[in-house]
Image: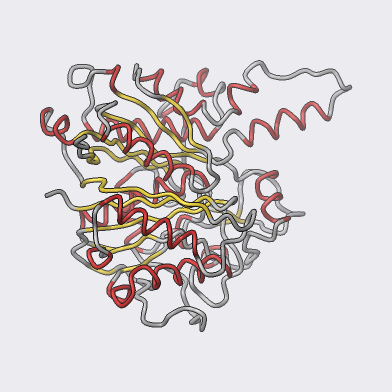
């Protein structure tokens, strides 16, 4: 069977450093940090008092006020980002068969704020189970693509992938496979998350996963730096319109690049820690290259998972050195989480978008906040430190890993 080609024809973003694609990209290449003191609740008794919140988001710019009250923030974010991507792709009632348009979305947690509010409200009562009738529909992780589908009448495959922080990368891979197998013409894919809550921050703090650099939030996310002390929690959404190549050409769509391949693997090692030698990461990158039919030396850029954790950063860079050998030092490696923080289930989507835009614009965003060299990291690697670098990026890979050992990687390439 001849597999069909899959291209990217639309992008949408709602992030801690920009509420649309242009704002997001401008902030990335200028090295802007989205970390700041938390505004959503009183942090006095919390170990970590900052996060990468979405800023200046007015839900009524996207969704009717009554409808918005029936949606958790993670679903609101999904709708906002997807609307931008659909408009960018130029999709209309007249140029697609909506029965062949799907929505495959990623979320690692889903409606955490809704769950927190409903349970706290119950706990304050007399024990009578009084819950909002929209409690369950607001909370469940699959509801974001449902909203996107219903708003647009898309009747193809519609579901959510849940694989912790690899969720939206897994969604992209699923969407890629549906299209190249000829089962869909177009799929809106990506991910969203809104876990900057008392429960979310408290839970990650209890695991000692978060940075506690409260005196300087904007420098707290520092991937590859010797003084890194954990990740910075972020929120938001990223959406990509994936489309069969000939279908996109026939309707005159703008094509950003081609999605050339995707890979998955499992560490099969630990609930939260990566394998110290990066064996699962080695496997996922090798699987991706094999799927794309590409050689290691053809890769120009890797947007790493790079969360700013002591173990994870080292393991991933070891894996890159193993897979790419001598060529590893020729690759522009970066971590855009240094600016956006870690968007959990939405991370794969917004980082895939960054990779696509690096191909389009010939610029690799920096890894900011690097000041102290880590002796455990190969000094020959180009980590694109602190300043964006111009580069003709023909092939870009984006790595995303999640608690439970879930690994996913996607590869984009300039269109032939």
Q: Quadrant of residue 99?
A: top left
Q: Quadrant of residue 242?
A: top left
At horizontal 26% and vertical 38% (from top left) the residue drawn is 10
Q: Is residue 205 above or below residue 2?
A: below
Foreground residue among 383 and 156: 156
Foreground residue among 376 and 223: 376
Foreground residue among 66 and 236: 236
Which quadrant does the N terminus fall into?
top left
At horizontal 54% and vertical 25% (from top left) the residue drawn is 71
In the picture provided, is 34 more to the left or to the right than 189? right
At horizontal 33% and vertical 57% (from top left) the residue drawn is 397
In the picture provided, is 39 more to the left or to the right than 384? right
The image shows residue 21 at horizontal and vertical percentages of 32, 45
The image shows residue 76 at horizontal and vertical percentages of 48, 31
Foreground residue among 235 and 136: 136
The image shows residue 284 at horizontal and vertical percentages of 42, 55
In the picture provided, is 260 more to the left or to the right than 303? left
At horizontal 47% and vertical 71% (from top left) the residue drawn is 369
């Amino acid at each position: 069977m001849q597999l069909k080609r899959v291209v990217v024809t639309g992008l949408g973003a709602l992030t801690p450093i920009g509420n649309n694609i242009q704002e997001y990209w401008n902030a990335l290449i200028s090295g802007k940090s989205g970390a700041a003191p938390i505004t959503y609740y009183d942090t006095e008794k919390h170990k970590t008092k900052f996060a990468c919140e979405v800023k200046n988001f007015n839900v009524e710019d996207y969704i009717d006020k009554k409808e918005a009250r029936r949606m958790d923030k993670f679903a609101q974010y999904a709708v906002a980002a997807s609307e931008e991507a659909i408009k960018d792709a130029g999709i209309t009632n007249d140029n697609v068969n909506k029965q062949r348009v799907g929505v495959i979305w990623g979320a690692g947690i889903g409606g955490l704020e809704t769950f927190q509010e409903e349970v706290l409200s119950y706990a304050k009562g007399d024990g009578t189970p009084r819950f909002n009738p929209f409690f369950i529909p607001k909370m469940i992780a699959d509801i974001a693509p449902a909203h996107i589908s219903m708003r647009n009448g898309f009747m193809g495959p519609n579901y959510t992938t849940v694989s912790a922080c690899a969720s939206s990368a897994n969604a992209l891979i699923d969407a890629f496979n549906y299209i190249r197998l000829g089962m869909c013409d177009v799929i809106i894919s990506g991910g969203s998350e809104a876990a900057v809550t008392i429960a979310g921050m408290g839970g990650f703090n209890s695991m000692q996963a978060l940075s506690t650099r409260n005196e300087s939030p904007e420098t707290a996310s520092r991937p590859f730096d010797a003084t890194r002390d954990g990740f910075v929690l972020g929120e938001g959404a990223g959406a990509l319109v994936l489309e069969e190549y000939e279908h996109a050409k026939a309707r005159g769509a703008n094509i950003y690049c081609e999605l050339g391949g995707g890979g998955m693997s499992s560490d099969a090692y630990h609930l939260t820690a990566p394998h110290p030698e990066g064996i699962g990461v080695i496997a996922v990158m090798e699987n991706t290259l094999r799927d794309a039919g590409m050689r290691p030396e053809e890769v120009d850029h890797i947007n790493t998972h790079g969360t700013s954790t002591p173990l994870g950063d080292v393991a991933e860079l070891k894996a890159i050195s193993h897979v790419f050998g001598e060529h590893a030092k020729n690759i522009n490696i970066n971590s855009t989480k240094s600016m956006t923080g870690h968007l959990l289930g939405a991370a794969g989507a917004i980082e895939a978008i960054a990779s696509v835009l690096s191909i389009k614009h010939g610029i690799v965003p920096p890894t900011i906040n690097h000041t102290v060299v880590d002796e455990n990291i190969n000094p020959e690697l180009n980590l694109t430190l602190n300043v964006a670098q111009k580069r003709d990026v023909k092939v870009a890979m984006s790595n995303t890993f999640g608690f439970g050992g879930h690994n996913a990687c996607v590869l984009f390439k300039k269109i032939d």
